[in-house]
């Protein structure tokens, strides 16, 4: 980063509330609405749904406390980039920044932009009745462009937008829970689910634990529990974002840890409430077979306007995630530019707006290109998954490496349950990497080829950057 006095640097403008909103806003995108039914297919009963979401929250917390130790020990802008630099060398930090710049962050932004576009089209499709087939791309492009501009205007504008969207989406989720409680059919649905489980149990003593019995009773093909867990952890993704803005957090030694823990716990509670609402209204079988679970839940009370209400809620959730990803992602690019000559223009903080304008513009431009090239929510997810979990693994292992390599560094917070919680999370990351790569090879070979070219390209770019730095000395 630029030495003190060489130019504008990040200011500590984020309070504990701002930081917690940032985490909650990024985690709660649209995953809970899309994955809840498929997660239910991977368990045998209603309490299995509750249990697997609790496990997902606990595993995410294991990862979050590892990042909390690193962020409080090294409270600088850039997150993983800083930790990987110190743990493995400058090449590792650069490769992380490169992959975040060209693969992960623009891809994550595009995932949420497509999610917003899908439901925005339900509310209003200006091209209805025409042959124009790219309405979703138009909405996705607009969301990326507008929110990038908002974040360029200043930190206050970016964080206020995030706080507003996060507050709205949390209130929306709580409203869905409230609807389930007052829905006239919720008690009937619950009683029906219990009666169905009792009938199955009467036919077979092991029916409640058998996937085959679940398929017979509820009319769906059960999924392996491993698939359900992958979907749960995907839905919890984003808790690590706090590390990217550590240099802008007020009282970082206390608030970084608090924001990570509070944000992860708050999301876990909200996800449990949401799944409880779905179960109460639709029953276990209804949840597992639903194609639009939140819409069906709300429609029990608002049959005529429920679809539009839930579409608006999902749009707000997706926009909150897009804004948070844009806000934090540009800080990674800024950190890379501040230390590598080849990206020097990206490592500058604009003196008037107080934001990394060049980093925001480049990130936004790549995201806009990916909207056009990838074309769908699923392709965008597959574009990012292997790289995301690889760096989760590398950064979590950095907790162990840096304790040995830099034992004298002050650590205001140390991982609770170390090393078991860290190793547990690393094992989960390894499993998810294997699963993501296996799935991509089996279903989306084109994505694998793109990544196999783009990711290694970072190493020659790093070599060129080193040569440029050496020649200037």
Image: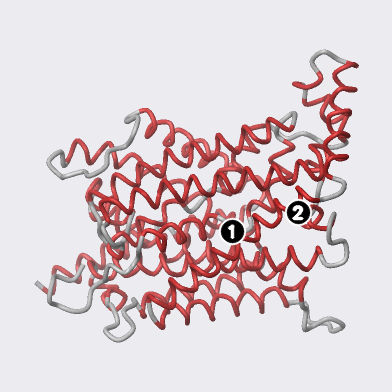
User: Is residue 60 rendered to the left or right of residue 464?
Assistant: right
Q: In the drawing, what numbered circle is on residue 170?
A: 1
Residue at left 43%, top 46%? 390
When the figure is inspected, residue 311 is found, relative to residue 265, above or below; the finding is: below
The answer to whether residue 37 of the structure is visible from this angle is: yes
When the figure is inspected, residue 381 is found, relative to residue 189, above or below; the finding is: below
Residue found at the far top of this picture:
205
Instruction: Determine the image quadrant of residue 217.
Output: top right
Instruction: Determine the image quadrant of residue 427.
Output: top left
Q: Nearest the camera: 222 or 183?
A: 183
Q: Nearest the camera: 305 or 34?
A: 305
Image location of residue 295, percent across then percent down: 78, 57
Crowding around mark 1 (Cα neighbors within 10 Å: few <14, some 14 to 19, many 20+) is many
Crowding around mark 2 (Cα neighbors within 10 Å: few <14, some 14 to 19, many 20+) is many
Image location of residue 296, percent across then percent down: 82, 54
User: Is residue 127 rendered to the left or right of residue 465?
Assistant: right
Which secondary structure, mark 1?
A: helix
Q: Nearer the viewer, mark 2 or mark 1?
A: 2
User: Is residue 130 rendered to the left or right of residue 431?
Assistant: right
Quick one: label 2 or label 1, which is nearer the N terminus? 1
What residue is pinned by disc 2? 179
Query: How far apart are the two marked residues, 2 and 1, measured between alpha carbons?
Result: 14 Å
Image location of residue 188, percent across then percent down: 88, 39
Which secondary structure, mark 2?
A: helix
Residue found at the far bottom of this picture:
352
Q: Report the quarter where the C terminus lies.
A: bottom left
Residue found at the far front of this picture:
182
Image location of residue 466, percent across then percent down: 21, 65
User: Is residue 351 rendered to the left or right of residue 378?
Assistant: left
């Amino acid at each position: 980063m630029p030495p003190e006095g060489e130019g504008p640097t990040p200011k500590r403008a984020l309070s504990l509330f701002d930081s917690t909103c940032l985490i909650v806003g990024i985690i709660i995108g649209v995953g809970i609405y899309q994955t809840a039914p498929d997660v239910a297919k991977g368990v045998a009963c209603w309490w299995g749904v509750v249990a697997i979401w609790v496990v997902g929250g606990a595993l995410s917390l294991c990862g979050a406390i590892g990042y909390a130790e690193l962020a409080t020990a090294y409270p600088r802008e850039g997150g993983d980039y800083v930790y990987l630099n110190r743990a493995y060398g400058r090449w590792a930090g650069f490769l992380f920044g490169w992959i975040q710049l060209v693969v992960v962050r623009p891809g994550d932004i595009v995932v949420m932009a497509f999610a917003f576009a899908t439901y925005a089209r339900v509310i209003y499709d200006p091209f209805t009745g025409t042959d124009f087939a790219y309405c979703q791309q138009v909405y996705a492009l607009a969301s990326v462009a507008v929110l990038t501009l908002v974040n360029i205007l200043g930190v206050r504008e970016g964080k206020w937008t995030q706080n507003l969207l996060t507050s709205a989406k949390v209130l929306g989720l709580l409203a869905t829970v409230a609807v389930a409680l007052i829905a006239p059919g919720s008690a009937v649905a619950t009683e029906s689910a219990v009666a169905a489980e009792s009938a199955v149990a009467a036919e077979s003593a092991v029916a409640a634990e058998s996937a085959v019995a679940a398929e017979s009773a509820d009319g769906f093909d059960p999924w392996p529990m491993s698939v359900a867990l992958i979907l749960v952890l995907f839905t919890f993704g984003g808790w690590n974002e706090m590390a990217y803005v550590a240099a802008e957090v007020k009282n970082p030694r206390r608030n970084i840890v608090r924001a990570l823990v509070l944000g992860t716990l708050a999301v876990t509670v909200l996800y449990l409430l949401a799944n409880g609402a779905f179960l109460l209204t639709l029953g276990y079988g209804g949840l597992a077979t639903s194609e639009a679970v939140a819409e069906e839940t709300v429609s029990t009370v608002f049959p005529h306007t429920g679809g539009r209400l839930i579409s608006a809620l999902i749009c707000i959730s997706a926009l909150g995630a897009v804004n948070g990803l844009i806000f934090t992602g540009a800080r990674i690019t800024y950190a890379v530019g501040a230390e590598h000559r080849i990206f020097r223009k990206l490592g500058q903080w604009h003196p008037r707006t107080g934001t990394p304008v060049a980093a925001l513009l480049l990130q936004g431009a790549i995201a806009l290109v990916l909207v056009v090239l990838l074309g769908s929510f699923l392709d965008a997810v597959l574009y990012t998954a292997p790289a995301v979990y690889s760096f989760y693994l590398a950064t979590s292992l950095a907790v162990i490496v840096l304790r040995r390599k830099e034992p004298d560094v002050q650590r205001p917070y140390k991982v609770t349950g170390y090393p078991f919680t860290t190793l547990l999370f690393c094992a989960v990351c390894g499993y998810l990497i294997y699963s993501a790569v296996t799935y991509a090879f089996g279903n989306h070979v084109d994505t694998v080829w793109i990544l196999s070219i783009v990711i290694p390209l970072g190493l020659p770019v790093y070599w060129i950057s080193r040569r440029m730095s050496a020649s200037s000395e």
